[in-house]
Amino acid sequence: MKNNFKIVEKLQKTRKYTKKSIVKKLEKVINL
C-alpha cells in the first residue's frame, strides 16, 4: 500500500494527470 501512495504523490507532483486519471489508476490498483 505504501508504494501505491508514493505513485499517487508522484502523479500529483507532475500535475500531468488529471484527477480523473488518478482515480482510474487507483481503481486499477484496488482491483489488483
Image (cartoon, helix red, strand yellow):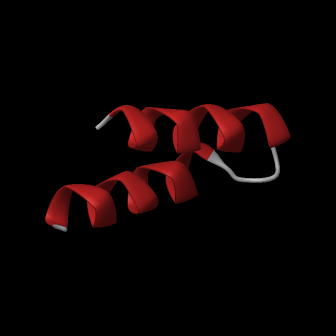
* Percent x, y of residue 15: 80, 41
* Percent x, y of residue 31: 16, 66
Q: Give the residue displayed 82% in from the left and 52% down from the top.
A: 16
Q: Give the residue displayed 68% in from the left and 44% down from the top.
A: 11
Residue placed most toward the observer, 22 or 7: 7
Specify the quadrant of the image occupied by residue 3: top left
Q: Give the residue displayed 55% in from the left and 59% down from the top.
A: 21
Quadrant in the picture for the N terminus: top left
Specify the quadrant of the image occupied by residue 24: bottom left
Horizontal side of 13 relative to 32 (left or right) equals: right
Horizontal side of 20 relative to 32 (left or right) equals: right
User: Which residue lies most toward the front here?
Assistant: 3
Residue placed most toward the observer, 24 or 6: 6
The correct choice, above or below, for 23 with respect to 5 in the image is below
The correct choice, above or below, for 5 with respect to 32 in the image is above
User: Which residue lies most toward the left here?
Assistant: 31
* Percent x, y of residue 25: 44, 60
Quadrant in the picture for the C terminus: bottom left
Q: Give the residue displayed 52% in from the left and 50% down from the top.
A: 22
Residue placed most toward the observer, 27 or 5: 5
Horizontal side of 11 relative to 27 (left or right) equals: right
The correct choice, above or below, for 11 with respect to 20 in the image is above
**How many numbered tags mark residues here?**
0
